[in-house]
Image (cartoon, coloured by chain):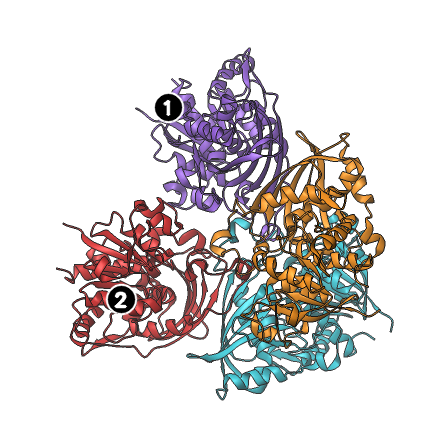
Chain colours: A purple, B orange, C cyan, D red
Amino acid sequence: MNRIPVTVLGATGVVGQRFVRRLRNHPMFEVVGIAASDRSAGKRYRDACEWRLDGEPYAGLGDQVLAPSDPAEAFSPIVFSALDNAPAKEIEPAFARAGAHVFSNAASFRMDPDVPLLVPEVNPGHLALLETQRRRRDWKGSILTNPNCTTTVLVMALAPLHEAFGVETVIMTSMQAVSGAGYPGVPSLDIMGNILPHIGGEEGKVEVETGRLLGKVVDGLAVSDPMAVSALCYRAPVMDGHTESVSVRLKGNPTPDQVREVLAAWKPLPQRLGLPSAPEVPIRLHTAENRPQVRRDVELDGGMSVHVGRIRPCNVLGIKFALLGHNTERGAAGGSVLNAELAVSQGLVS
Amino acid sequence: MNRIPVTVLGATGVVGQRFVRRLRNHPMFEVVGIAASDRSAGKRYRDACEWRLDGEPYAGLGDQVLAPSDPAEAFSPIVFSALDNAPAKEIEPAFARAGAHVFSNAASFRMDPDVPLLVPEVNPGHLALLETQRRRRDWKGSILTNPNCTTTVLVMALAPLHEAFGVETVIMTSMQAVSGAGYPGVPSLDIMGNILPHIGGEEGKVEVETGRLLGKVVDGLAVSDPMAVSALCYRAPVMDGHTESVSVRLKGNPTPDQVREVLAAWKPLPQRLGLPSAPEVPIRLHTAENRPQVRRDVELDGGMSVHVGRIRPCNVLGIKFALLGHNTERGAAGGSVLNAELAVSQGLVS
Amino acid sequence: MNRIPVTVLGATGVVGQRFVRRLRNHPMFEVVGIAASDRSAGKRYRDACEWRLDGEPYAGLGDQVLAPSDPAEAFSPIVFSALDNAPAKEIEPAFARAGAHVFSNAASFRMDPDVPLLVPEVNPGHLALLETQRRRRDWKGSILTNPNCTTTVLVMALAPLHEAFGVETVIMTSMQAVSGAGYPGVPSLDIMGNILPHIGGEEGKVEVETGRLLGKVVDGLAVSDPMAVSALCYRAPVMDGHTESVSVRLKGNPTPDQVREVLAAWKPLPQRLGLPSAPEVPIRLHTAENRPQVRRDVELDGGMSVHVGRIRPCNVLGIKFALLGHNTERGAAGGSVLNAELAVSQGLVS
Amino acid sequence: MNRIPVTVLGATGVVGQRFVRRLRNHPMFEVVGIAASDRSAGKRYRDACEWRLDGEPYAGLGDQVLAPSDPAEAFSPIVFSALDNAPAKEIEPAFARAGAHVFSNAASFRMDPDVPLLVPEVNPGHLALLETQRRRRDWKGSILTNPNCTTTVLVMALAPLHEAFGVETVIMTSMQAVSGAGYPGVPSLDIMGNILPHIGGEEGKVEVETGRLLGKVVDGLAVSDPMAVSALCYRAPVMDGHTESVSVRLKGNPTPDQVREVLAAWKPLPQRLGLPSAPEVPIRLHTAENRPQVRRDVELDGGMSVHVGRIRPCNVLGIKFALLGHNTERGAAGGSVLNAELAVSQGLVS
């Protein structure tokens, strides 16, 4: 099969670099363009930014010249966007108008009811929103989004429970990695030996996006599930990987063992299709009572699976457990790439 | 006033050292004895252990010889115990039998219905259990305990809310400091850049002790409040101070502003009495949205106040907030000393 | 005695805040002005910046309005400058021209041969340069500087050795705290669990300033000592306090014991004068083989003493030892304030 | 080729686990035995210890039963020893007597003049000591050792310089990872946000072993080079990888460029032989002024190469540079395995 040409917008940032690294040698996609802000466009990749990941610097594209973030100069049928919210608001629609399918990591369009907010294991059916989107917006292309990193990890664990039992309420305290704030991001003076009790806008995103992802498509529009979600988000001195402390009320009051069985048996669409970025096992279940641990577990499966451990009764909501997932892989670049794989497998690009 | 002679049991450990440091130059107490296990007894304090706190090493008692943990050799009318649970089970009753009032940081007797489990701001009336204790156990002295460090911090914030509104349910995720595990405690290989999802026995203690502290004395025995408490306890790479992420359902559904007012107005007994170790303001309310922060705030007031910030609505339980307190001061040595100050002020020792 | 009015330039930064905190309730000085860049001037202190230190926020001056960095609006006889090098180059001479004595923490004028580069314990005689400075520059006031933080700590240990034996060569590897880079400073993504092998310009400053501080005044100008100094500077994940690993060749090859005696006996001018910010003991000698440790020792004496331990033979240069000092107190704000105390004691301001 | 059966002694510790992980699927060796102390012998590997590395737990050998550390029960022609020094002193000779070639990571026999202290890139000729060893000790097998981890990293950088120019003196300050102390090793209370100025016995080992490794074999015995080496060893809050700050005097005073060329051109025996564990490039040269960095660089090449950067003039000794290497791979398990590969390639086992 011929690989589909793709462009990465915002390639110089940390998430942009993860996109580039993931897409090099990808079986379905070929990076033809890397784009950046006007300040960096025209420079070679290696001159425009420091490479902040391990592995081969610039994923071997260090000599490639950065294009401007303009469809006239950087068009390709599929575009991955690691843009910040403000520029995303202008640039992503420009690409969609020009016919590109934009897989965006930005928050700008996530909650529009005709824009798929997508985690392939969770709500692949939301691709159906694209028809409405095309009709309403008169774009040749489209915009598809992935949720906030903290939401992504949470809905991966909730989806099979929602399907099997029905999720009624969720309380989740997160201990989030510094990489979620990008570079330079969190000053070391603020976070070394410290816990920060506030991450701007994060709690609201998790509370709104979770119901949206576990909701339905009705008459071509997304309708959120009415479950009650409360998020309490903290920053912790950890590099990569968000730890989430979850309590949940499920219909029918299942036991921890029943919950465990449902999570273990879950085999959603991306795994059945064998999509290239789909982890073989979407939820890794831990039995050791002191696991999962972010530093020791989060890089497994290229950061694409989530980890659940310590499933036990909650005196208040019925079930509680420890949850862990990779914020910049599953929760950002990897999630977007998997979205594209799903969309292509469902015929988005002909 | 003549100072009351006191002995510190378990003086070589980290909590024991905090006891000694707090009690030096104390207006009500005078350290006459420091005791340790048989392995250390007979040695000078400075030779038996490293001093792990800042300030003057060994609080100036480096040359004092450690006594064995035996009332025949280390009796005083008041005894502070930093013993581990196992030795506490034997040694503390021996001292109580000999006539000492033992203020214990150990878990061994906390849940006995005739033993005061005490936080002076929260349940000073539980001193009334001592009458039952004396009657039942036929000790000349007594045992009084302080709760687990995580519980202590939690009930400080819940007590005024329970009084003003009534607490129905609580979900609390803790991010606990390494100092809570003593020395050598948590290996750096386990906690650097990591979060541990399990602290042995901690969740159960918090869930049981909270209702006990907020409960009543009925017919001379402690009766726990039936509130539902769910604790999810994590270890984080922080030196001193437990951060607690709290959601709570209060009767009558007060607003965040009403909750804030109640916490601000709280002036419990130790503050009214002006006990030496009582912080002037028991709950420090923060208005900056990124406070309290453990590294920046926890040492205020000698670690004896707790900190509350980000009081806001919770979609599930009604109110949520960020809570912070010092685990080895308010939650251990300082808490025990304040218990003794309260008991003496109420006539325990004549 | 009436307190001398002083102004703090650059009051919003981390070093500026330390100046303000140190100068509140100072027996010789009274903060009458706090100044900042045009962006902040006219705002109240509390609105212009976050307070990043512990203790009382804004040292009680939160409501004071920030002046512009202009002698016409913020003159006082003594001025403390926490400015960055570029603005310092313009602003400090403007104040000196207007008659102020500027005690600067910036690098801009340090190596000018008519500007005192001063550590009061080390080279108080360099105040004599002021006469030349006044003659040459025709300023009514003057500029006096303190060295780079790493240099300051190093020369505190070298000065008594240079006096007693003569320092011939020094090799010093530093492990420097993140606070040395100001705020926001070092990104957590760069330093958590990491060591950085480069701090821009630092090594050159230490190598040049050390000889200057241990040099002489000849014909009214500073003449550096010709000793060879090699500095290797690293950044380590530590909050406050620079650890320095020092090897030194001394004339006459003294033994470790002889070195220890000289350091222990050192009682330089500020200590003899009893200047308010001078630590009683300028060099704290540690005998425990695992001390000094930055987290446990650096805050002693308000961060104004330096710490030496593990004095032992060096196979290459003769003597080696572990050295530690506070980079933002002794190495910045505290050092500048002590300079002013010395200058006033010597009659700088009448 | 048939793989040679090997046994790992001390398989439950951190270094032992690294041995097992490295030797699984090794082209020359096959793990047939894993042995441990009497306390663990007889248990399955997974029951005797926690697995502390990433990758497949227990390297797939979780069900294998641990043998006692006794040649009668755990003999194989090649044995890798991760034993501590005290048990190594008894157990390693017992295996050698029984005919095994023991590749030891312990310090017990390193400085014996008839025991090869070996880094294959540095002194492969020291294998010649085995003849003397056999003659003197009358063992059918032998003992071969690798140096202390800090020494290993240092001599990797010094060896090509010694060959090209001659090393006269070395001053080295290390910033060592916590993994070097094993498990549980360094308490988090001691090292978080801290630097420790002392590592028991480390400095002496580096000072003595360096000359030994860069020395000669004369009349069948090892003779150390008389170079002067001074080591100043610190512990830093880093997981894996020792950073070394090196100053060196070389004969003929080469320039930094000449030093760089020599390091770049170095192609020692293991690389020429293509031994399986030899990194293609033994010394990775960095040109970015802020590299190498331990967290970002040390895992490259499976931790088997060392990293050099910032080669620049030293005012005192002539040349200084930043050095980095993996303490538990190149400096322990990986180093020992490479020793065995070299020895087998030179006909040790027939």
- Residue at 68% from the left image edge and 43% from the top image edge: B210
In the image, farthest residue toward the left: D350
Chain at numbered mark 1: A
Q: What element carries label 1?
A: helix
Figure quadrant of residue D83: bottom left
Q: Nearer the viewer, residue D212 or A68?
A: D212
Evaluate whether residue C93 shows in this view. no
Q: Which of B73 and A100 is in front in this view?
A: B73
Residue D343 lies, with reference to residue A156, above or below; the image says: below
In the image, D281: left or right of D232?
Answer: left
Give the total number of marks visible in the rendering: 2
Residue D267: percent from left, percent from top: 25, 60
Q: Are marks 2 and 1 in contact (CB under 8 Å)?
A: no
Image mark for residue A272: 1
Q: Distance between the residues labelled 2 and 1?
A: 53 Å
Name the residue tied to disc 2: D92
Q: Is mark 2 on a helix, strand or loop?
A: helix
Residue C218: percent from left, percent from top: 63, 83
Which three-letter amino acid code belongs to the residue tagged 2? Glu
Figure quadrant of residue B5: bottom right
Residue C309: percent from left, percent from top: 55, 75
- Residue at 53% from the left image edge and 29% from the top image edge: A147
Residue B254: percent from left, percent from top: 77, 32
Residue D243 lies, with reference to residue D64, above or below; the image says: below
